[in-house]
Amino acid sequence: MAGLTERRWRVQHFRSRACPYVTQAVEQITGRPGRHLDPWLMGDNLLRELFSRGARHADLAVVEGTLEPRRPAPDRSLYNCPGDLSQIVDVLGLPKIALVPCACLRDLHVPRVPDGIDAVLLDGVEDRHEYELLRQSVSMVLRKPVVGAVEALPEIRAALRDAPREHLLPADLYERLGASFLRFADLAALRSLAESAATPPFVDEPRARAPRLFRIAYAQDEAFGGYLPDTLETLESLGAELVEFSPLRDEALPEAVDLVMIGCGHPDRFADALAENLSLITALRAHVCRGHRIYSEGGGTAYLGRNLILRDRRVPAAGILPFDAELLDDPTPPAPVSRVLLRDSWLGARGTIVRGYRSGRWRLQPAPEPDGCPGRSGPLTSQRDIYFRHHAVGSLIHLHLLALPEFVSAFADPHLPSLSLS
């Protein structure tokens, strides 16, 4: 992507899991926020819509994921795992490029590649001479074209592995990788391969601009900012006016706010600064005590608890939801989960099924209800990964609103300020 962007290609990247990622490398390199396709959450029509919408202004769309072995089943949804490209490829008619490590080829072993591969990209080539030898071997044995390669560059890869994922990448790292890719890339073959896709062109039908019906303040600063682009765009299309605020620096919420959203982030890295901003915490508590809504995910939910339990200390948090949030020593990637709501809330009625990706960085430990405007509160799921207090809802599960139409209406429906959950 760095190499193609250097050549003035507009590249749109998609992941095959609809959950936020800590790294912002895609947007940093391409200038376009990464998007998400997920057959585990989305039906065929939604996959087509999101791909067409996201790729309509790009020269090239790249969908990243893995191809899992298919299991015989009458319903495709039964054998597609989260992250599996199979259904995405089938629905969108995309060509497939296999990333093949050169180490296997040097041992005179051609690795097995999934069926239906259209081309190969070599990873870890030493020089131009080796590239030509390996290209000929792959072409002869696999009978597939090689469209490019990236050199081994061990020092660059080591630096990328060690770089903090929450920080911007040093530009020289990805620029050198991009230059390596361009030394071997067959750009004409890549363009021809992309143009062979059977995906119909996006038809951008003119729509009347939705009237601004409600106001959403969403946290956006160094501590928070993990939002799916589709979620924000969907809320805007439903009539939301989106305004940013900073839990680190702002002393008050924006005026006349109907809903506050605090997305995933790293409150642990800014724990002291967040705790010291008592004016903003007071504003959030007052928002809840007036019966207004808050919705948070991941790190945003940890911030809304009573305390952040870090590796070496305990730091007071916003004190809105009845738990302490413990930062895990060995965090895991977001995991696909299904949950059932135990009681009614504005998010959904009792029995509603919630599907999404659960954060693996935090554990919520039940704690007494915070002081101030006491009322109904507690977990919304038996696994205690979604909590509520009045109309504040904090979840460790990342949701893709377009894949959950019943939740879209919950965000957009009129809400009368009240301390009642009914």
Image (cartoon, rainbow, N blue to C red):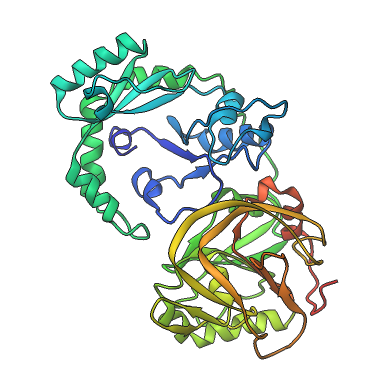
Query: Number of labelled discs?
Result: 0
Question: In the drawing, does residue 309 fall left or right of residue 385?
Answer: left
Question: In the drawing, does residue 190 fall left or right of residue 82?
Answer: left
Question: Taking 251 as reference, is 232 above or below it?
Answer: above
Q: Could you say which is closer to the camera, residue 408 or residue 342?
A: 342
Image quarter where the C terminus lies is bottom right
Q: Could you say which is closer to the camera, residue 103 or residue 11?
A: 103
Q: Residue furthest right?
A: 422
Q: Quadrant of residue 149?
A: top left
Residue 201 in view here: no
Question: In the drawing, does residue 305 fall left or right of residue 57?
Answer: right
Query: At 45% from the left edge and 76% from the top edge, which residue is drawn?
Result: 248
Question: Taking 146 as reference, is 126 above or below it?
Answer: below
- Across and down, in percent, residue 274 comes to 46, 80
- Across and down, in percent, residue 83 comes to 53, 40
Query: At 27% from the left edge and 50% from the top edge, which residue is drawn?
Result: 160
- Across and down, in percent, residue 92 comes to 58, 26
- Across and down, in percent, residue 227 comes to 54, 56
Q: Residue furthest bottom?
A: 371
Residue 382 in view here: yes
Question: Taking 317 as reference, is 397 above or below it?
Answer: above
Question: Taking 319 as reference, is 383 above or below it?
Answer: above
Query: At 46% from the left edge and 84% from the top edge, which residue is drawn?
Result: 315
Q: Quadrant of residue 376?
A: bottom right
Image quarter where the N terminus lies is top left
